[in-house]
Amino acid sequence: MTDQSLRGSATMGAIPALQILHRFVRGLSRFALYISGVGLIVMTAAVFWQVVGRYVLNDSPSWTEPFSLLLMSWFILLGAAVGVREGDHLGFEIGLHYASPAVRRLMELTTHVLITAFGAAMAYYGWDLAMETWSAKMAGIDLPQGVDYLPLAGGGALITLFSFERLLQDLVKPLVPPVPLGAEHSTD
């Protein structure tokens, strides 16, 4: 699905603030996805270096495992946030498919509210964990232990923002479009 088909450009043009938010969030989403991809590549290189150090040099570097896990936390949570923005999160599609347009709209709005609340809680408690453990050092790498929880705060903040943007877009839409039936259910 394209960004345009998910949001409906006609309703966005009516409210300039939503259009500005949409552009900002779209750019932030692309940036998060790019950073996530770079993190995956860097993590792969670190794991490769771990294997070379262990089996070729017979001197396993201590920093590669915690560094790789930290990168993995970032790219998973950034990717999950982008998935929320694109509507690729888990859902009850069969329920949406057979619900009336009014019930479908209520279900989608409720989903956005719940995901926004979940993301906000994840950001809040992730930040709280990071601050509570900041004074300790991570094993194997000279970073504060709190750095391990920053991906929760960052990913949660993005999930909150991305879901809130979708909620606003759905609130200004006049009606939820019908879910298309497959070819086997066509009336033609």
Image: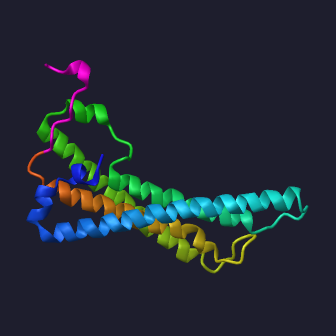
Which image quadrant is residue 163 in?
bottom left
Q: How is the image coloured?
A: rainbow
**Residue 14 vs residue 145, the one in the foreground:** 14
Q: Position of residue 140 (x, y in %)?
A: 75, 70
Q: Position of residue 76 (x, y in %)?
A: 52, 56
Q: State left or right for residue 1 relative to residue 48.
A: left
Q: Position of residue 175 (x, y in %)?
A: 10, 46
* Residue 120 visible in the shown view: no
Residue found 19% across the figure and 67% down from its top: 19
Above or below, 45 against 20 in this view is: above
State the predominant SS element of the stretch in magenta.
loop
Q: Is residue 11 a member of the stretch shown in magenta?
A: no
**Residue 81 vs residue 3, the one in the foreground:** 3
Q: Which residues are magenta?
A: 176-188
As drawn, which residue projects farthest toward the bottom? 135
Q: State left or right for residue 95 relative to residue 152.
A: left
* Residue 131 visible in the shown view: yes
Residue found 24% across the figure and 69% down from its top: 21
